[in-house]
Amino acid sequence: MPHTIRQRNNPNSPNIRKNGPKWKHLQNRSEAVNTNNALDYGLSFPTGYTAFKALLSARIVAAIWCHITDCDETFNYWEPGHYLLFGKGLQTWEYSPKYSLRSYTYLLTQLVPAFIYNALLQPDKLLLFYFQRCLFAVACAACEVYFYKSVCREFGIHVGRITLIFLLFSAGMFISSTSFLPSSFSMYMTMLSIGAWYHRKYELAVFTTAISAFLSWPFAALIGVPIAIDMLFIRKEFTKFTKWCLISCSIILLPMVRIDSLYYGRLVVAPINIVMYNVFSKHGSELYGVEPWYFYLLNGFLNFNFIFLSALFTPFALLAVNKLVSVNARNPACLPYSLSILPLYLWLAVFNFQPHKEERFLFPIYPLICLSGALTLDALQKIYFRIFVRTGQHYLHYTSQIVFPTVFITSLLGVTRILALYK
């Protein structure tokens, strides 16, 4: 039987979830709306609600037990946040009006719940700290569920399930999910923008990319390059792209400039300032240390173990599947692999060649690492089936000896790394 690669429906849509169990099982093709994909026939998968409960549990654990791993989080975000809440706090040079690299608007938007909580109950500061981190946990889990559902829609239930497990147990997600850092917020926005793109909700994809680039980290605009390519050169939606870029600037950038200018006492466009300082200044970011070219390889393996290594080989694995495995014609509505997984490799290509490297610089693509790792594992199952089995209903019935040990080992390694961080 020829094997299709990807599923075209959203298995977690309300029509499929309605009155369903916590773990959904596709009984017949009529449940898979607008698809004739035999690969996802008969597969069990967690609904969005079940996935949210699992992810939220993992993120709350991170909020409570994960220590602060980056000095920037302490001195550039918690300290200024303390100043905004209580009127006192340490200031770094980046918040000096002379440089004005950091945005107060980002801080204010993140701390709105803390302002309300503190005004109403005046809790102990430690409780306020954990309250804020738990809110980050809820936000991250919600974004992850949206991303998981979009992966199921674009790549199939099986890839979605594996991606969900990788998200749950990876040390990288444990560290980044509740950090008070722009790169963590950009990670949330990456899941929303890429998820919206996979759902073909281009307006939301552009808007969330703009939020990430303007409000948190301007370099996160790199994630939106493939979305722009899709809209401008494939779909020819110039008007929609331009319209939503202008809407995003009006809603996000203009108020941000106004707020930051009030705090700094002069006209400030923080995203431009940080780009000018880090990219176009004489010394650049390497003033704060340089790392060898393999820094991200070591750090990626530390945080994602074999998931990271497999993610690096996803393009080759997909190419091998295309050459070795007979596949049905791909749905024209489907994004080409060369575009749908491009954000990860574009990010790695740019940041790996920067002399100054830090762990948090990869936070925005952590969910994409999990996705690419899942795609590689799925591709290996298809290749194994094609070489050693050849006949049967479909490849998942004959390749469980590949997926289960892999998921178990990577999850175990992730948990042991998390325990090491806690201790």
Image: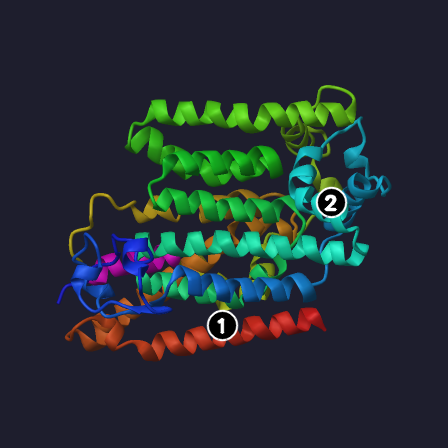
Q: x%, y% of residue 196?
A: 40, 43
Q: Is residue 153 left or right of residue 285?
A: left
Say which element carries label 2: helix
Q: From what the image shows, is residue 265 above or below residue 186?
A: above
Q: x%, y% of residue 83?
A: 82, 41
Q: Main secondary structure of the magenta part?
A: helix
Depth check: 281 or 200 in front? 200
Magenta stretch encompasses residue 325: yes
Q: CA distance from mark 1 to mark 2?
A: 32 Å
Magenta stretch encompasses residue 178: no
| Residue found 46% across the figure and 77% down from its top | 408
> Which numbered disc, 1 or 2, marks the residue closer to the eye?
2
Crowd around label 2: few <14 · some 14–19 · many ≥20 (10 Å): many
Depth check: 388 or 1 in front? 1
| Residue found 34% across the figure and 29% down from its top | 232
Say which element carries label 1: helix
Q: Is residue 346 left or right of residue 386?
A: right
In this view, which residue lies farthest toward the front?
120
Q: Are marks 1 and 2 in contact (CB under 8 Å)?
A: no
Instruction: Read off the residue under disc 2.
Output: 77
Chain part drawn in magenta: 314-326
Q: Amino acid at mark 2?
A: Tyr
Point out the tag, 1 or 2, that comes first from the N-terminus: 2
Q: Is residue 174 left or right of residue 233?
A: right
Q: x%, y% of residue 316?
A: 35, 57
Q: Is residue 183 left or right of residue 344?
A: right
Q: x%, y% of residue 52?
A: 47, 61
| Residue found 67% across the figure and 33% down from its top | 105
Q: Amino acid at mark 1?
A: Thr
Please give the label number shown on residue 31.
none
Instruction: Read off the residue under disc 1.
Output: 410
Is residue 141 among the parts visible in the rendering? yes
